[in-house]
Amino acid sequence: MDATLLNFKLVVSDLERSLTYYRIFGLKEAARVEFTNPDVTEVILENRDGARPLVLIQSDIMPVPSITAGWTPLVFNVDDLAEALATVAAAGFESAIEPLDLGALKIGMTSDPDGYLSEIIEGDTQALEGIPVGQKIPHPIPQIHDRK
């Protein structure tokens, strides 16, 4: 069997506010599908290369799941983490952690309007060779849990 992951779907409470958030990361609305009986709206988001990795769903019969802070973020690669975090803040969204500097990579995290986490990475993830032997850095999970 040959299989390909097409996309990931998130149930959201406010489509327009969620679209504002995901546009920050270069995603744009590619298609909108309105279902009836029951009323469900799906917005398919497309990135620069034409892939459609994310679908936002809104419906009165599908509540947003209760978000428990954890380690299940969507991951975005950017060319400038500081600029991305400034854009996120200017749009009214908060950082979930203080940015981490791992040398080849810089990592930040934010959350969308419904609390879904986004990990934002600057740098080439293929270049990461790990932390020098004997050196450890704090994992961001406690910071994420502390913000609730």
Image (cartoon, grey):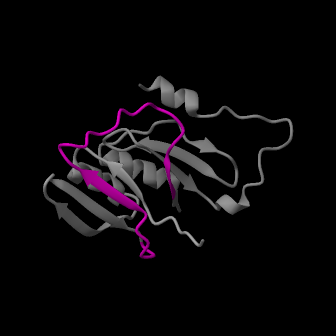
Residue 122 location, quadrant: bottom right
Residue furthest bottom as drawn:
50
Majority SS type along the magenta span: loop
* Image coords of residue 92 (percent x, y): 29, 43
> In this image, 32 relative to 127: left or right?
left
Residue 61 or residue 115, whichever sits in front? 61
Residue 133 horizontal side relative to residue 10, left or right: right
21 vs 16, left or right, is: right
Callout count = 0
Q: Locate the C terminus and report the quarter of the image it occupies.
A: top left
Is residue 57 magenta-colored?
yes
The residue lying toward the viewer, choosing from 92 and 143, is 143
Where are the magenta residues, as a range?
48-76
In the image, what residue occupies the spot 26% across and 70% down?
Answer: 31
Q: At 35% across and 56% down in the image, what residue appears?
A: 22
Camera-side residue of 78 and 66: 66
Which residue is located at x 60 percent, y 71 percent?
Answer: 1
Residue 23 placement (x, y as % from top left)? 33, 60
